[in-house]
Amino acid sequence: MTKDIGSAFRALHQPGNPFILANAWDAGSAKMLAALGAQALATTSAGHAFTLGRPDMGRVTRDEALSHAQDIVAATNLPVSGDLENGYGSAPETVAETVRMASEAGLAGCSIEDTALPDATPYEFELAVERIKAAAAAARALPHDFVLVARADGILNRQYDIEEALRRLRAFVEAGADCLYAPIPRETADLARICREIPAPINALAAGPKYTALTRADYAKMGVARISLGSALARVTHQAILDAAKPFLQDGDFSALSHGANGSEIDRMLGS
């Protein structure tokens, strides 16, 4: 990781001109996304968990996540942001340590959730803010630029409403977060409201029917600065396994296997 990469990653965060943060789950998917024109990459905690044969939500350790992040960083020359769940601990000092370790792993930034994983319960407001304050202090003390994203996941987890999400996002800005993220608001109008009312770049998640129906131009009009995929692309690949394997395992029908990607094209991307 160099200062230039961190600064370049920060420069991509332009409200009203969103870039697509492509979430990769292994070195191969990272290389393919880079070859297809991605400007930056992120890890996906769910996608990584799937590669380990585990379900999502707090089943991967910090050491495993950071080792995985190093693999993604090494796969391309693009900046990479780490999906580091809740920072792998509740205490603010633990979250700060995770940020320092993320930097050492070569990440250009990371996101920290306000959820007490593996449960969906959100941290109490004051603790949630203190955790981001500690993470921001650790990020600012690094010798290079590092983009800290604070997540308010209560809407996604059905734990609180848009008003509480906004209250937390405002407090996270004050605590020093660089980019704010409340995944999947109930209505797209709520996402537009977040962009209007929060004085910092906003990340939107392109997942679920309402949000995959939007175009980049739609997100731009709302004022979004960054569009991430989360585990959506990883789940598309798992759907392909379901669609292809069920017919041949249940009925002996192999026809779905004729729809695979061209091997030469994949080889070209992985060799780049």
Image (cartoon, grey):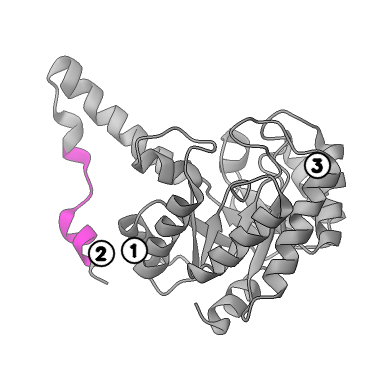
- As helix, strand or loop, the secondary structure at mark 2 comes to helix
Mark 3 or 1, nearer chain start: 1
7 on left or right of 62: right
Q: Amino acid at mark 2?
A: Leu
Q: Main secondary structure of the magenta part?
A: helix
Label disc, if present, on residue 270 of the rendered structure: 2
In percent of width and height, residue 125 lies at 84, 42
Q: Residue at x 52, y 49 (%)?
A: 229
- As helix, strand or loop, the secondary structure at mark 3 comes to helix
Can residue 178 be seen in the rendering of this structure? no
Q: Disc 1 designates what residue?
A: 31
In percent of width and height, residue 120 lies at 65, 31
- As helix, strand or loop, the secondary structure at mark 1 comes to helix
Q: Nearer the viewer, residue 34 or 52?
A: 52
The residue range painted magenta reads: 258-270
Q: Separation of disc 3 and disc 1 at Cα? A: 35 Å
Q: Amino acid at mark 3?
A: Ala
Q: Separation of disc 3 and disc 2 at Cα? A: 40 Å
42 on left or right of 141: left
Q: Nearer the viewer, residue 32 or 222?
A: 32
